[in-house]
Image (cartoon, grey):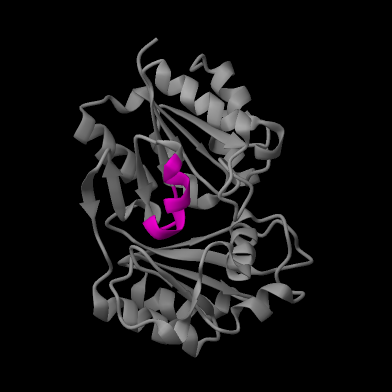
Amino acid sequence: MAKKLIFLDIDGTLTEPGSNEPPASALEAIRAARRNGHKVFLCSGRNPGMLAPLLRFDFDGYISSAGGYIVVGDQVIYDCPMPGEESERALELLHESGVFCTVESRDKTWGDEDLGDFLSGAGAGGGNSEIERWRKALAGSLNIRPMHEYAGEPLYKIVVMCLSPEQLAPARKELEDRYNFCIQEITDPAHPCLNGELINRQFDKGRGVLRVCEYLGADVKDTIGFGDSMNDLEMIETVGTSVCMDNGSSALKKISDRVCPAVSQDGLAREFEALGLV
């Protein structure tokens, strides 16, 4: 078979949300696929600082910050932070509407000081890998710093959490022409927490895949992408073969070529074998 470029989301796909420890079965499948000549990349909303603990597993590169910062081997091939005046204005509008935020530079992440209280309350239910990731991140596993320590470093992404879509309306009105408001679907109506990301329209995970293909001279039809949530949408729409985890978004499953077992059920290893990668 043709050698493939394989792109793996992290939270809810390669690992349990908020974890830095992939199942042993997934690591062995990745090693076997690479021995067979395939290349394996992380493709994550995490910034480089938050995905760094996973790089010890010898991936061929990574698409980070939802496509805003891309590395192949040891070469940075794309780097696109938000203009400072736009990130400042976005935070101003969101905070004025009571939206909880985290902001991500290349290496660090800061969160509103009262975000933990919000996530521990009744408004933020389970069933969403992004919310679970932030719960664990704020508990200390991913080194989120308090927002008052943020000193204006260039940002790649703003994560938002709130209870009502109306809270996002002012920021949408002013910024949506330049930023995609990628909002996760609500999986538990009893816990209607909205969460999502503001992502510069100059990039996304799908265009990240295309940029890696262009750099390596590869055909996009020879790519495979694994994801679980709506911030994987553009990757799923771009790759030659798209796979959604069984623990993932129902909306994403509907448009994916394949659905594989959940991350907790050795889903990656089983699907690597089904696809003939190992």
Q: Position of residue 276 (x, y in %)?
A: 51, 14
Given residues 83 and 115, the one toward you in this image is 115
Answer above or below: position of 186 versus 210.
Answer: below
Is 50 part of what is drawn in magenta?
A: yes
For the N terminus, give its image quadrant.
Answer: top left
Q: Residue furthest bottom?
A: 96
Question: Number of marks in the image?
Answer: 0
Query: As drawn, is 25 to the left or to the right of 55?
Result: right
Q: Main secondary structure of the magenta part?
A: helix
Is 78 part of what is drawn in magenta?
A: no
Q: Position of residue 26 (x, y in %)?
A: 57, 31
- For image coordinates 34% across by 34% down, the residue present is 60
Q: Position of residue 187 (x, y in %)?
A: 70, 56
Regarding residue 45, the answer to whether it shows in the image is no
- For image coordinates 72% across by 74% down, the residue present is 120
Answer above or below: position of 160 versus 271.
Answer: below
Q: Position of residue 73 (x, y in %)?
A: 27, 38
Query: As drawn, is 134 to the left or to the right of 216?
Result: right
Residue 165 picture quarter:
bottom right
Answer above or below: position of 210 versus 32.
Answer: below
- For image coordinates 28% across by 72% down, the residue present is 154
Q: Residue furthest front?
A: 56
- For image coordinates 52% across by 46% down, the residue present is 10
Answer above or below: position of 226 versus 228.
Answer: above
Regarding residue 154, the answer to whether it shows in the image is yes
Q: Which residues are magenta?
A: 44-56
